[in-house]
Amino acid sequence: MSIVHVTTKKELKEQLKTKKIVLISFWAEWCGPCKMFARVLNQLNEECNGKVKIVRVNVEKSPEIAEEYKVMGIPHTRLIIHNKLREPIIGYVPFEKLKQMIGV
């Protein structure tokens, strides 16, 4: 499964229609920690082999989505596990720690 990039609330809503764990990653092109975290997300995507759906939202292209999720700083990650939105994860998270947080 590939990482999905969304720009509208409608696209995000469609991506959330799943029974899988969803990871929403808020980022921007100019953000250094976001670039580092993108490598972690790629590794997670490869290793978890479809168990986790990764959705990325560029805060500059989709400010209304960022506002809805109360994004104040980036990288900002939200997990949806068993259809429940978890507390935000702010900043860079190493791969192993992220796997622990998700439970995969």
Image: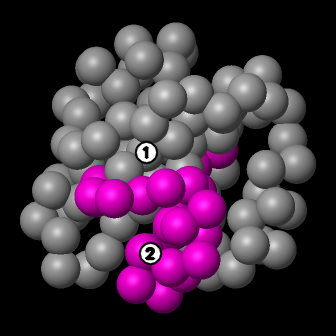
Camera-side residue: 20 or 87?
87
Q: Is residue 13 magenta?
A: no
- Kindly identify which residue carries mark 1: 77
The residue at the point 53 percent across, 67 percent down is: 67
Packing grade of label 1 (10 A; few <14, some 14-19, many >=20) is: many
70 is higher (above) or lower (below) than 95: below
The residue at the point 59 percent across, 77 percent down is: 64
Identified by mark 1, the residue type is Thr
Tell me which segment is drawn in magenta: 51-75
| Mark 1 to mark 2 CA distance (whole Å) | 12 Å
Name the spot of residue 83 as percent of width and height, x first.
Answer: 80, 30
Circle on res. 58: 2
Packing grade of label 2 (10 A; few <14, some 14-19, many >=20) is: some
Which corner quadrant of the image does residue 2 belong to?
bottom right
36 is higher (above) or lower (below) than 91: below
Q: Is residue 68 magenta?
A: yes
Q: Is residue 12 left or right of residue 30?
A: right
Q: Secondary structure at mark 2?
A: strand
Identified by mark 2, the residue type is Asn
The residue at the point 37 percent across, 36 percent down is: 89
